[in-house]
Image (spheres, rainbow, N blue to C red):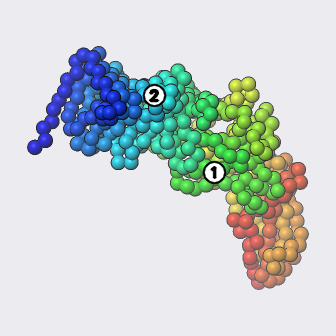
Amino acid sequence: MKIFTTIFLLGYFLLTLGSAQAQGFIINGADVVVTSGADIYVDGDANGGFTFTTAGGDVNLDGDIYVEGDWTNLGPTQGLTSRDVDGYVYLVGTTNQSVGGGAAATATYFENLTLNNAAGATATVDLNTIESVFDLEAGVFTLNQLTTVVDNTSTAAITRNTGSLRSEDNTAPYGTLRWNIATATGNYSLPFSEVGNTLIPLGFNVTAAGVGGTYFDFAMYYTIDQNTPLATINGTGLVILPNHATGTGFTTGGIDQWKYVLDRWYLINRDDAYATNPTTTLTFTYIDIEHTQGTNIINEANLQAQRYNEATTLWEGFSWINGVVNTAANTVTVAGMQGDLNNEAWVLVDNTEPLPIELLGFDANCDDDVITVSWASASETNNDFYTIEKSLDGMNWDFVATISGANGTGNSNQTLYYNYTDYSPLGQLSYYRLSQTDFDGSTVELGVEQATNYALECK
């Protein structure tokens, strides 16, 4: 028969463990009540852990728990119950502390969690939740490809002295901070840092409340010189690629587009339950080496934000590229974002060479004894003209026509429709090819994945 015991701690309680004991504070089915003003201090550095076994047990925390080792919850429940606004858990070790217990562990719901450990802490279970204040006094809290939740709409729910958050895993799923902003307004700051411990906060200033949703997920990570690994959508492994018909990755039309993209991805993912997104001002922070390293060709003064449109699977084009760069503060600020928040992945680009735009469609259809070539673009950037060619074998091409891009202006952020009628078709199975040429003379063959070399037979 298992006996469940309730322990009441009414005053200061000190548990000191040396390395020989190597157990820490273990709850094996008991209930512990820590009243207001009472403290538990689990000493012993890495050996001073706080553990809930698989037998479970709960801590009714109105006081404080100081832990020098790992926080492990292997029980069936959240561990801390009847949490009070005054109940704090402090991570105060001298070696990196884990918070969770691994894949078999249960997420813990903290009222307040303070990291005050220069060696930092690492999340080891998904969806650990802080319901009041997440205080980053010292050290880096590594999100570790997991999601840590702040369930408090206040902009003061995350505070810091010298501490920070890190999601620099640069493999999907990224370490994510989920902030349950719901329908609140205010200037939220995500104190991310990079692997060199430079602070690179992400600003999310909600100026008009959203309707219906609960949370936003935030992450960012650095990349190598060619902006890889590429970002994914909702962690599904769907890589985001611009038009790369003539090369790989960000190479288009002989231009290495990645040379003009800052070496960092920013991920902002909303709760789909939002019927109306909040209106926000986004502030992206960067570090100088991310626009100067390797083969990058970026004029820092030209940096602006560009987003990937998940609905069209296209990069938003010239007239959308937005933001005001502050080269002294290393920030790009974009105001008035609302519907744009439906899109997760963002980059900072040199606005003279933004990421290219793909076609929405390309068709070549027989109509009696003529062929009508038609296509549509979602938006266009620096587009001088399109070229149509035809071929019998798909290898040797004959010129058909050129069509000016974007009504002669070269730039558009609206869907444009084009068509051309070839009154002299080849009269048998043939192929039509569409290319696009920028004002600088670079040319891209379009539609390699959208009916390039489209085969048809006109009768």
**In x, y percent, where is residue 171?**
56, 49
Q: Nearer the viewer, residue 254 or 160?
A: 160
Depicted 85 relative to depicted 107: above or below? above
Q: Nearer the viewer, residue 189 or 136?
A: 136
Q: Which mark is residue 319?
A: none
Depicted 239 relative to depicted 424: above or below? above
Relative side of 77 to 287, left or right:
left
Q: Nearer the viewer, residue 449 or 28?
A: 28
Identity of the residue drawn at 76% across and 72% down: 453
- Looking at the rendered structure, the kind of residue marked 1 is Leu
Q: Report the number of discs.
A: 2
Which residue is farthest front? 20
Which residue is farthest left? 1
Q: Answer whether residue 206 is visible to the viewer in this image.
A: no
Between disc 2 and disc 1, whose residue precedes? 2
Q: Which mark is residue 94?
A: 2
Relative side of 348 to 164, left or right:
right
How crowded is the residue under tag 1: few (<14 C-alpha within 10 Å), some, or many (20+)? many
Quick one: quadrant of the N terminus?
A: top left
Relative side of 253 to 171, left or right:
right
Depicted 253 relative to depicted 35: above or below? below
Assign a secondary structure to mark 2: loop
Res 300 → quadrant: top right
- Looking at the rendered structure, the kind of residue marked 2 is Thr
Identity of the residue drawn at 49% across and 23% down: 137
Depicted 262 relative to depicted 331: above or below? below
Q: Which mark is residue 230?
A: 1
Identity of the residue drawn at 42% across and 42% down: 124
Q: Answer whether residue 386 is visible to the viewer in this image.
A: yes
**In x, y percent, where is residue 111?**
36, 27
